[in-house]
């Protein structure tokens, strides 16, 4: 079906941070499946682990215990604020599970008949119907009305607006079940959360027994230079969602919850493929490789190198570029509003220079390479980006 606006490029194989097209041309991949291929392409560790897994079990039903699922859940709980995990297959599915959790919390814990979930303008939470309703971007709603009821929106990082919206909804008593928000807005323009805003948000949610749910689908699993985005904000959420980098290129998602927020009971939610042995083996391998190879340190070192180089390019091309923002290896180059450049145009032009990049809206060029990118590869990335910008004049 015609659901994707694709670049005129077909990729057929890859290794590390490099991919090749059907003509054999190599590209430095700073898209990584949109922040997904944490260990790069054709990782030896993943090849070995998943090859071995296929010799034992690839899928069984959640009617039975699944050792790999339980092992991955233990790892996630040990390395986060969560106490338990529900596994699914994507970020949208994880957020759908979070929305159901929030609604049940609203009914059961706050006595709300028609619970409301607050989310941020310019957010992105997925394409399924409830998740896209939670997404605070009207362009994703058009043509799919009526949207799911029970959502309202506030400007990201805007504390007075959030407080006013919350007060309006709760004027006659409990009405809000949860706030669902990204610690860093990815698709919305690579906008980091403001710690002051998030700490006050945490306080407001705690005071009213409103769940604070973080969408860590893009920023979680080490991409920010910490395991989780919330570590940059000085808070802990009641629940958070994962996908993308957790599987290193294999389909897996997860909803992680603290015990106090876990209102699900058997039968409340389920997934045929969620938490299957193959996907969980991929997640375990990614987690252990990040630890074994010290990739959080690499993310921070390469981020510093990349930001320094990008700032130099911003100064050189100041008629068109205005700044750099983000965390770790989720960075955005911001285009001036009065420039005749746009982010999709730059991403397309970069292909000709052997570099893959991705837009985050019309005015932000996103750079999300594998977490294994080397010092030399960052240098090449900057050289190819400079060549791209120079070619546009």
Image (cartoon, rainbow, N blue to C red):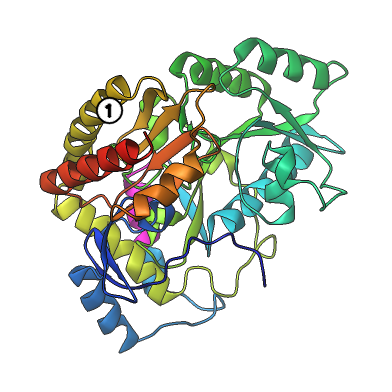
The answer to whether any part of residue 257 appears in the image is: no
Which picture quadrant has residue 287?
bottom left
Q: Magenta residues? A: 72-81
Confirm whether the magenta stretch covers residue 76: yes
Q: Return the residue found at the far top.
A: 160
Q: Which quadrant is home to the N terminus? A: bottom right
**Residue at image point 14% right, 53% down:** 293
Residue 44 appears at what percent x and percent y?
18, 71
Q: Is residue 281 left or right of residue 300?
A: right
Q: Which quadrant is home to the C terminus? A: top left
Residue density around tag 1, few if under 14, some if 14–19, many if 20 or more, within 10 Å: many
Q: Return the residue found at the far bottom.
A: 55
Q: Return the residue found at the far left.
A: 376
Q: Nearer the viewer, residue 145 or 257?
A: 145
Which picture quadrant has residue 88?
bottom right
Q: Nearer the viewer, residue 392 or 323?
A: 392
Q: Which residue is mark 1?
A: 313
Instruction: Using the image, determine if residue 382 lies above or below residue 91.
Output: above
Q: Nearer the viewer, residue 86 or 351?
A: 351
**Residue at image point 54% right, 80% down:** 61
Which picture quadrant has residue 169?
top right
Residue 163 appears at what percent x and percent y?
68, 14
Residue 54 appears at what percent x and percent y?
33, 86
């Amino acid at each position: 079906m015609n659901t994707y606006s694709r670049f005129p490029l077909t990729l057929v194989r890859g290794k590390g941070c490099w991919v090749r097209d059907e003509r054999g041309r190599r590209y430095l991949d700073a898209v990584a499946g949109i922040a997904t291929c944490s260990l790069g392409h054709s990782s030896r560790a993943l090849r070995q682990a998943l090859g071995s897994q296929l010799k034992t079990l690839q899928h069984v039903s959640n009617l039975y215990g699944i050792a790999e699922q339980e092992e991955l859940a233990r790892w996630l709980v040990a390395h986060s604020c969560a106490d338990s995990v529900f596994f699914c297959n994507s970020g949208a599915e994880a957020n759908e599970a979070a929305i159901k959790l929030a609604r049940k919390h609203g009914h059961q814990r706050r006595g709300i008949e028609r619970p409301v979930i607050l989310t941020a303008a310019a957010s992105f939470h997925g394409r399924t119907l409830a998740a896209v309703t939670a997404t605070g971007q009207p362009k994703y709603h058009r043509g799919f009305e009526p949207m799911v009821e029970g959502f309202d929106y506030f400007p990201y990082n805007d504390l007075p607006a959030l407080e006013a919206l919350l007060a309006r909804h709760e004027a006659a008593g409990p009405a809000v079940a949860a706030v669902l928000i990204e610690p860093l807005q990815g698709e919305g323009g690579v906008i980091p959360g403001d710690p002051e805003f998030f700490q006050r948000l945490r306080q407001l949610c705690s005071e009213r027994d409103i769940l604070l749910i973080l969408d860590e689908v893009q920023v979680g699993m080490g991409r920010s230079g910490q395991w989780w985005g919330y570590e940059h904000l000085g808070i802990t959420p009641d629940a958070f969602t994962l996908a993308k980098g957790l599987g290193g290129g294999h389909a897996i998602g997860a909803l992680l919850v603290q015990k106090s927020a876990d209102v699900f009971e058997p039968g409340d939610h389920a997934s045929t493929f969620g938490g299957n042995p193959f996907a969980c083996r991929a997640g375990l391998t990614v987690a252990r490789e990040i630890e074994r190879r010290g990739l959080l340190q690499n993310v921070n070192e390469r981020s510093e190198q990349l930001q320094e180089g990008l700032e130099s390019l911003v100064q050189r091309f100041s008629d068109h570029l205005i700044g750099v923002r983000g965390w770790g290896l989720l960075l955005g180059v911001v285009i001036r509003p009065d420039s005749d450049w746009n982010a999709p145009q730059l991403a397309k032009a970069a292909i000709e220079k052997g570099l893959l990049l991705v837009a985050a809206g019309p005015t932000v060029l996103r750079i999300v390479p594998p977490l294994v990118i080397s010092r030399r590869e960052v240098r090449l990335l900057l050289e190819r980006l400079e060549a791209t910008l120079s070619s546009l004049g």
